[in-house]
Amino acid sequence: MTHSPPPGTPRARIPGPQQPPPPYPRIRAGLWRRCLGGGLAVWALTAWVAYETRDSALLPTLILLGSFLAPVAFVLWAYERHGRDLGVSAILGCFLTGGALGVLGTSLMESYLLRPSLGMFAGVGLAEETAKLAALAFVLRGRPGIRGMRAGLVLGAAVGFGFAALESAGYAFEAAVSTEGVDLRALLETEILRGVLVPSGHGLWTAIAGGALLSRRRLNGRFRIATPVVVTCLGVCLLHTLWDATNGLALRATARLTGAGLDRPLFAQAYLTRPSAAQEHLFTLFSVGGLVLVALAGVGWVRSLTRRDPSLRNTP
């Protein structure tokens, strides 16, 4: 015989099905803007304090902020726009692990490419792009479900920006350390220049190569080294080579147009000896113009890839 509870007694509720957790963290739109703006303010304040106090203890903070700020902001932008369903762990893993493995692999391969020449720049471009693409494949080896053009563009960019951040930190450290002590001005100039150029460099190139690689990934997770993948990687290496060789090509073009002689072979001489005002203007025009052309070629390439993927076109 069952007894009913007295009137007014609350009834026990039978637990129903719980809502599954969201597939990705709810990050408010515009986080990348706040990260970039706040980071720039902190970096500028750190630079001012370091300049006023000459405190070398601030150098690690200054180097890390200046090197990682722009790459992290662009990765956040890519995550907000196109990579939420890929997961934070995949993007963060590509940024950190892929960048670190790319830098290590590049250092090992480039140790044999010491002679300044066009072949050296081609070898450096091939080594760096191969190392970054291998790092991307390594990070995604246990994630067979991640494939497609959009995933390749986003995760390839994450690897490239991770590589760029670590590489910029190395260049900033080399610029800061001199025989006369800490050169703060050279450090700041290096970080500003690389921060401005980072969107059109490693992140862009590895995004293109990653898109080609993951768009032809098999359902079982294996990577296909098909002809389009190889051709794309060679094209990316060409952009990388032209980017690195722009300074030498601009120097040669300036010398030929102005009738100036070079004391050393091409790419072994960084600047003209006692240049005139006209030579300085021409060199700046050719060097900056060359970088702009290479950057525009990379951006146009990425735009052509996004037009082929409806998921990229329809993303708000």
Image (cartoon, rainbow, N blue to C red):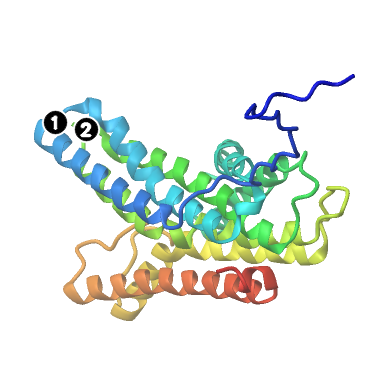
Residue type (three-letter) at the residue carrying disc 1: Arg
Q: Position of residue 128 (x, y in %)?
A: 59, 49
Q: Does the rendering let one see residue 116?
A: no
Q: Nearer the viewer, residue 315 or 279?
A: 315
Taking the image as shown, residue 120 lies to the left or right of residue 286, namely right
Taking the image as shown, residue 181 lies to the left or right of residue 172, namely left
Quadrant for the N terminus, please: top right
Which residue corresponds to mark 2?
182
Residue lying at the far left of the rendered structure:
52
Q: Position of residue 5 (x, y in %)?
A: 72, 24
- Disc number at residue 54? 1
Q: Does the rendering let one see residue 166?
A: yes
Q: Position of residue 139 (x, y in %)?
A: 69, 40
Q: Tell me which label, 1 or 2, sits earlier in the chain.
A: 1
What secondary structure is found at the residue carrying circle 2?
strand
Quadrant for the C terminus, please: bottom right
